[in-house]
Structures are given as structure tokens and as C-alpha cells.
Image (cartoon, grey):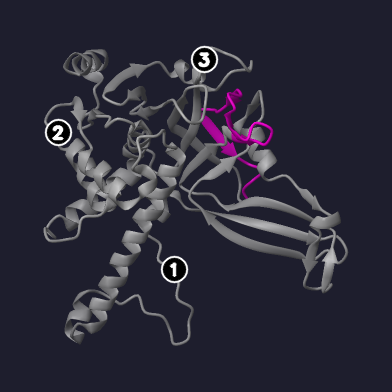
């Protein structure tokens, strides 16, 4: 990597961002799914900063139990504190912990990067919630004087409903979807909210993220055997249903459903469809608020023709430069090269490098990329 590292430094020259580090990650047999997602998360600046802050506040707890959060914080801290600007790091402790924690990632089979991202974010939230609960219990059993010293307790009035804890992972990635169902007989609208860390979108050939989002929130009629039970009519009725983004997240993660189960084949097939993802994305017809603008800062790419084999790489935007991370290798790429990862307009194409997970950051919220 020495040569590649110095090549990257030469390419950036005096434009090398102050204090930034570009490190490849060693692959332990089949861990490209993990490496590609970790690079995207490392260059998700607000997430990285909050994770490093967590690490700084907790590293004194030498006896603290090791978990995925401490391993990830340790890895990010290791990268950001390197003396060299470029190089390779082995995320050994993190990968060992991941395999220990979840048997799904233990085998040497091809893993799914989206499953890993989902598992990781939910695991981080679980750990943070448990820590907050432990701290709250400790505070409740501590003497009154200490309670005051630790600031006001996040207590609620008697009988008030306990609000779910909002961690810094939620603040970055969580959005709210609302599922609206309108009874076609009495016109009553029933809305049900649900939270999400990423949006999984069905894809079509020669489409775009905007059209996929439109389809995601398009109106569907529930009739025949799909009728809806209306509480007001107290019976099954025809209804119209649609999904809307009620509260857009700060970091919008879009997962393109490129792996589809084909009944006739009895297995999954990779859809190499061309789906255009813009560098700047406007959420208009999905959100209730005014237009929200997002800027693309990372893409996890699946390389290969099938779902059970292949490779993952990532493209990352850092300080207005685009970089290509392929396990240990890191190189600069031109912004125009991003469009070569949209997919193929013909079914059988030699290009098998397709955008799979897209990371967008909302603009006008301290975007440092």
C-alpha cells in the first residue's frame, strides 16, 4: 500500500485536507461487505465526530465490557489518530467481535452489506440505550446531592408516558414514515407512523432514485381480498393506502433492492438495472415539509453478476474529492466516474459494478463534506 498511499498523497498534493486520513482496510477472507460500509460510515462526518466524542468520554473505562460500539469507536480513533496520512489498517478486533456477536457473519460465504449496516446501526442503538438505562438507574440510587451535581434528571411527570431515548445514532439516521390509509366509504384517514434507518427501494430498468421514491410513496388501492378494516365503519372496506416520509433523516440511506427472488428459478437473481442516483437529491413529493435537499457522500457498490458471490467497494466524497476504497487500496477518482456505477441498460453487460447503498447528507446542516 506504501506506493498506492504515496500515489494518493501525490495526487492530492497540497490539497490534502488538513487532519484527514485515508486508510484502506485489510480484508480477512470475505470481509469486503464490512470494509465498504465502515468506509461510508467513517466519511459520514457527523456520525464519526459523535463516535469519536463517545470514545473520548469513555476510554477511561478500561474495565468496560468490549462490544461492537467500543470496537468501532476504537477503530475510528485508530484511523483518525494515525501519524501517516494514508496507509492500511486491519479492523481485526471489530471483525472478531462482529463474528462473535452474530453467527450470520461467521461463515466465509458472501455476505450482504445492507444486512450488515442494518445489524450494526441497531446494535449500536441497543448498546447506547442499555448504557443510558444503567446510568439512569445509577443516578436514581445515588445520594440526592450527587443527583443535583449530575444535572436535572430526565424525569417525567407522574403518569406521563416514557419517551423513547433518542441516541446520536437516531439523530443522524432516523427518519419517520407515515402509512396513511383512507377508507373509500367514510373518507376517514388512519395514519400509522414508523421509524426507519434506511429506505429499501424497488428498482426498475432505466429509472432514477426520484422515480423509485415516487413509486415508494404512490397510492395503492386495497380491494377484493385486500380490503381494509375501517374502525369507523366497523367493517372491511375498499381503501387507498400510501406511504410518506413524515420526518426526513439528517443522513438519508437508500438501499436499492438489487437482489430479487425469482420463483421460477427458486433462487435470488441480481438486477443490474440502470438506476440514476444524483449527486444532489431533492425530497419533494415524499416529505410533508418543503423540499429538502441532500448531497451524496458515499456509495457502497456491489461488484459481480450474482447475489451469492462478488465483491463490495465504496466511493466516498471527502472535502470535495471523490475517493475509491477497495479493501486495502485507496485512490482518487473523478466525480464523473460516479455515473459508471448506475448500472447497465442491457441485461447482459460486462459492467457488473452497481450502486447498492447510497448515503446522502441533508444540505444546510453543517455539511463538512
- Give the residue at the far right of this rendering: 185
Which badge, 2 or 3, comes first in the chain's sequence?
2
Q: Position of residue 191 (x, y in %)?
A: 68, 63
Find numbered disc 1 in the image and state the secondary structure of the residue it sits on. loop
Find numbered disc 2 in the image and state the secondary structure of the residue it sits on. loop
Residue shown at the point (37%, 37%) measured from the top left: 37
Q: Position of residue 320 (x, y in %)?
A: 37, 25
> How many residues crowd around disc 2 within 10 Å: few (fewer than 14), some, or many (20 or more)?
some
Which numbered disc covers residue 351?
3
Which badge, 1 or 3, comes first in the chain's sequence?
1
Residue tagged 2: 82
Find numbered disc 3 in the image and state the secondary structure of the residue it sits on. loop
Distance between the Cα atoms at labels 1 and 2? Answer: 37 Å
Magenta residue check for 149: no
Distance between the Cα atoms at labels 1 and 3? Answer: 45 Å
Up-down relation of residue 16 to residue 110 (above or below): above
- Mark 1–mark 3 contact, CB under 8 Å? no
Up-down relation of residue 65 to residue 40 (above or below): below
- Mark in front: 1 vs 3: 3
Residues rendered magenta in the picture: 260-287
Distance between the Cα atoms at labels 2 and 3? Answer: 36 Å
Which quadrant of the rendered structure holds the N terminus?
top left
Residue shown at the point (67%, 51%) measured from the top left: 243
Q: Quadrant of residue 317?
A: top left
- Mark in front: 2 vs 3: 3
- Residue 266 is left or right of residue 89, and the answer is right
Magenta residue check for 263: yes
Residue shown at the point (60%, 22%) measured from the top left: 274
Which numbered disc covers residue 118?
none
The answer to whether one can see residue 362 in this image is: no
Which numbered disc covers residue 164?
1
- Residue 137 is left or right of residue 111, and the answer is left
Amino acid at each position: 500500500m506504501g506506493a498506492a498511499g504515496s500515489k494518493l498523497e501525490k495526487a492530492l498534493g497540497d490539497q490534502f485536507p488538513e487532519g484527514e486520513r485515508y486508510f484502506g482496510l485489510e480484508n480477512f477472507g470475505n470481509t469486503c461487505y464490512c470494509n465498504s460500509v465502515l468506509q461510508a460510515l467513517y466519511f459520514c462526518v457527523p456520525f464519526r465526530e459523535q463516535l469519536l466524542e463517545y470514545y473520548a468520554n469513555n476510554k477511561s473505562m478500561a474495565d468496560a465490557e468490549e462490544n461492537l460500539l467500543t470496537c468501532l469507536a476504537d477503530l475510528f480513533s485508530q484511523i483518525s489518530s494515525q501519524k501517516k496520512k494514508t496507509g492500511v489498517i486491519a479492523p481485526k478486533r471489530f471483525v472478531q467481535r462482529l463474528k462473535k456477536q452474530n453467527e450470520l457473519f461467521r461463515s466465509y460465504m458472501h455476505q450482504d452489506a445492507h444486512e450488515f449496516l442494518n445489524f450494526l446501526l441497531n446494535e449500536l442503538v441497543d448498546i447506547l440505550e442499555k448504557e443510558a438505562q444503567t446510568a439512569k438507574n445509577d443516578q436514581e440510587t445515588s445520594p440526592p446531592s450527587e443527583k443535583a451535581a449530575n444535572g436535572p434528571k430526565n424525569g417525567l411527570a407522574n403518569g406521563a408516558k416514557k419517551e423513547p431515548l433518542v441516541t446520536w445514532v437516531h439523530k443522524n439516521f432516523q427518519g419517520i414514515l407515515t402509512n396513511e390509509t383512507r377508507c373509500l366509504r367514510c373518507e376517514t384517514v388512519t395514519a400509522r407512523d414508523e421509524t426507519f434507518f434506511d429506505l429499501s427501494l424497488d428498482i426498475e430498468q432505466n429509472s432514477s432514485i426520484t422515480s423509485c421514491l415516487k413509486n415508494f410513496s404512490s397510492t395503492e388501492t386495497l380491494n377484493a381480498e385486500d380490503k381494509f378494516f375501517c374502525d369507523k365503519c366497523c367493517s372491511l372496506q375498499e381503501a387507498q393506502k400510501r406511504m410518506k416520509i413524515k420526518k426526513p433523516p439528517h443522513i438519508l440511506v437508500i438501499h436499492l433492492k438489487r437482489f430479487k427472488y425469482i420463483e421460477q428459478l427458486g433462487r435470488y437473481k441480481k438486477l443490474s438495472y440502470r438506476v440514476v442516483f444524483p449527486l444532489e437529491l431533492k425530497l419533494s413529493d415524499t416529505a410533508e415539509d418543503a423540499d429538502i435537499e441532500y448531497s451524496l457522500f458515499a456509495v457502497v457498490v456491489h461488484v459481480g453478476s450474482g447475489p451469492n458471490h462478488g465483491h463490495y467497494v465504496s466511493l466516498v466524497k471527502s472535502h470535495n474529492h471523490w475517493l475509491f476504497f477497495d479493501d486495502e487500496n485507496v485512490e482518487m477518482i473523478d466525480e464523473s466516474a460516479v455515473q459508471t456505477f448506475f448500472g447497465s441498460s442491457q441485461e447482459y453487460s460486462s459492467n457488473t459494478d452497481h450502486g447498492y447503498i447510497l448515503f446522502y447528507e441533508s444540505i444546510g446542516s453543517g455539511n463538512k463534506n
